[in-house]
Image (tube, grey):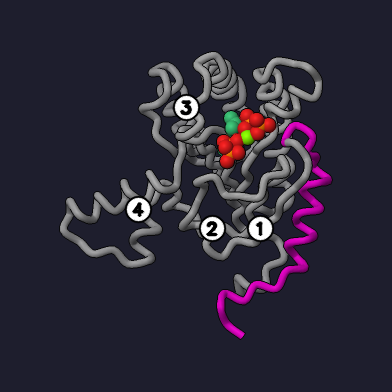
Amino acid sequence: MAEAERSVPRHVAIIMDGNGRWAKKRLLPRAMGHRAGLRRMISLIGHIFSRGVEYCTLFALSAENFARPAEEIEALFSLFREYFTQNVAELEAQGIRLIVIGDRSLLPADIQGAISHAEEATGRGARGTLALAIGYGARQDLVCACNKFVREGREATQETLAQSLSTGTMPEVDLLIRTGKEKRLSNFLLFEAAYAELIFSEKLFPDFTDRDFDGALAEYAKRERRFGKL
Ligand code: IPE
Ligand code: IPE
Ligand code: MG
């Protein structure tokens, strides 16, 4: 089937925003919002791949988020630690290959090790690819790729630049969803989402249900993608 005719997006990207406000509404510490967000993410991943999506990129932590108070970053590190130790077997069982994109040097050494282990353990997964963006920034990723071309004395093309990004093994984004009311990209997949369909949800991420995701898929199926043509 031609790409433009597919009703199910091959590559879905989600900006999982609103954890802090979810906690605030309940008079809970922000860390509890992140915990609720992680729980929702784990169950949503299974649902997303059950719908025939092949690639899913989830924005978990931006490079810019490191400017938040140390206490919040530490809480997020604890959740990542938990995630990469407790959920790898399940991804492996589901045939989902996990990759992590972003600047890993921002993360503690033990988490870097857990990520490498998780990527290795799930590396043969053929049912789908899950990319978790942690310490990620699209501008940083583009600069890094450009510098590689400069070092190698090569000119980039659209294709070779795309392949040199941290998302290089994935096709471009078809559908980009942002939860949590804001309508901006916040430095996520600036190159890869050039022709993505955008859907903004009012739901805070911990409240974004499987049904809400199906609603976004239904909306996507109704969109006419023209890629500049008539
Ligand atoms: C998104 O939720 C997760 C991260 C950025 C780590 P936020 O923490 O940004 O939640 P809000 O936007 O403050 O509600
Ligand atoms: C974007 O959310 C990053 C993630 C969801 C990981 P932010 O909360 O950091 O975005 P801004 O600051 O509202 O643009
Ligand atoms: Mg936010």
Q: Nearer the viewer, residue 112 or 87?
A: 112
Q: Which amino acid, by three-letter code, is at mark 3?
A: Phe
Mark 4 or 2 closer to N-term? 4
Q: Is residue 212 magenta?
A: yes
Which residue is found at the position 47% from the left and 36% from the top?
Answer: 100
Q: Mark 1 or mark 3: name the one nearer the start of the chain.
A: 3
Disc 3/disc 2 C-alpha distance (Å): 24 Å
Q: Nearer the viewer, mark 1 or mark 3?
A: 3
Q: For mark 1, does the 10 Å Cα neighbourhood hold few (<14), some (14 to 19), or many (20 or more) residues? A: some
Sequence-first disc among 3 and 2: 3
Residue 11: image quadrant is bottom right
Q: Is 194 displayed left or right of 144 in the figure?
A: right
Measure the C-alpha gap from mark 4 to mark 2.
Answer: 15 Å
The nearer-to-camera label among 1 and 4 is 1
Frontmost residue, 175 versus 25: 25
Q: Which mark is residue 164?
A: 4
Q: Earlier in the sequence, mark 2 or mark 1?
A: 2
The reply to whether residue 77 is in sight is: yes
Task: Identify the residue position indicated by label 3 in the image.
Answer: 66
Amino acid type, mark 1: Leu
Query: Mark 4 CB in 8 Å range of ligand 2?
Result: no
Helix, strand or loop at label 3? It is: helix
Q: Position of residue 198 (x, y in %)?
A: 66, 58
Q: Is residue 185 left or right of residue 218?
A: left
User: Is disc 1 in contact with disc 3, using a CB cutoff of under 8 Å?
Assistant: no
- Could you classify mark 3 by the number of other residues whose Cα lies within 10 Å: few (under 14), some (14-19), or many (20 or more)? few
4 and 2 marks in contact (CB < 8 Å)? no
Our reading of the magenta stretch's main secondary structure is helix
Instruction: Say few, some or many: other residues with alpha carbon within 10 Å of mark 4 (under 14 / 14 to 19 / 20 or more).
Output: some
Residue beneath disc 1: 198
- The image quadrant where one finds the C terminus is bottom right
